[in-house]
């Protein structure tokens, strides 16, 4: 199985080999602001199984548990594509909205329900977390 995707203009692209380790919705206020939407669909992928190409710009912000969240976007079109720093993090989040075939996204969880606006309605059957899973 292989999944491909990228930003709106196509300048920043990726290929994922195999299925993501997990997938869900993040409803945190930072993802809302970063995306301009009510949530971000994310997929967790081992760094060794995803290859990025093209230029990215990163924006880092404080995140839960004293971590720093790094969100990478295309400097031309602004499309959000992935989280984490290449060569530093062993794991990346890839934003599901950037998939070429959006049907490949199979969410099983939703995190940061505490920040979810009422106008975001989640599908049934997800495992729900008020903040981050342990
Ligand atoms: Zn772009």
Image (spheres, rainbow, N blue to C red):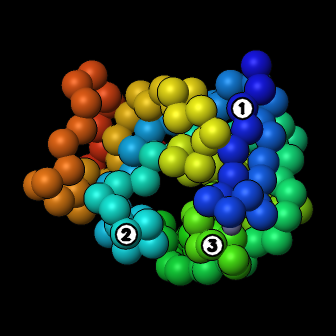
In the picture of the structure, the residue carrying the numbered disc 3 is 77
Q: Residues within 10 Å of mark 1 (few under 14, many from 20)?
A: some
Residue 134 occupies quadrant? top left
Residue at the extreme left of the image, as rendered? 118
Label 1 secondary element: strand
Quarter of the rendered image showing ligand 1: bottom right
Quick one: quadrant of the N terminus?
top right
Is 67 situated left or right of 82 in this image? left
Give residue 102's mark: none
State the residue in front, 7 or 133. 7
Label 2 secondary element: loop
In the picture of the structure, the residue carrying the numbered disc 2 is 36
State the residue in front, 129 or 94. 94
Q: Position of residue 69 (x, y in %)?
A: 57, 70
What's the residue at 50%, 79% (across, down)? Answer: 62
Is 41 situated left or right of 120 in this image? right
Total marks placed: 3
Please indicate, yes or no, whether residue 44 appears anywhere in the rendered image: no
What's the residue at 64%, 39% (across, down)? Answer: 100
Q: Is residue 125 above or below residue 88?
A: above
Name which of mark 3 and mark 2 comes first in the sequence: 2
Label 3 secondary element: loop
Asked if the beta carbon under badge 3 is closer than 8 A to the nearest atom of ligand 1, the reply is yes
In the picture of the structure, the residue carrying the numbered disc 1 is 3
């Amino acid at each position: 199985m292989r999944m491909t995707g990228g930003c709106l203009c196509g300048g920043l692209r990726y290929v994922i080999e195999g299925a993501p380790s997990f997938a869900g919705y993040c409803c945190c206020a930072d993802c809302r602001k970063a995306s301009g939407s009510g949530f971000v669909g994310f997929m967790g992928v081992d760094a060794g199984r995803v290859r990025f190409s093209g230029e990215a710009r990163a924006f880092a912000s404080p995140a839960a548990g004293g971590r720093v969240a790094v969100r990478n976007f295309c400097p031309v079109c602004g499309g959000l594509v992935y989280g984490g720093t290449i060569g530093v993090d062993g794991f990346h989040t890839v934003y599901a909205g950037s998939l070429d075939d959006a049907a490949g996204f199979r969410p099983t969880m939703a995190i940061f329900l505490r920040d979810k606006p009422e106008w975001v309605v989640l599908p049934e059957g997800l495992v729900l977390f008020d903040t981050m899973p342990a």
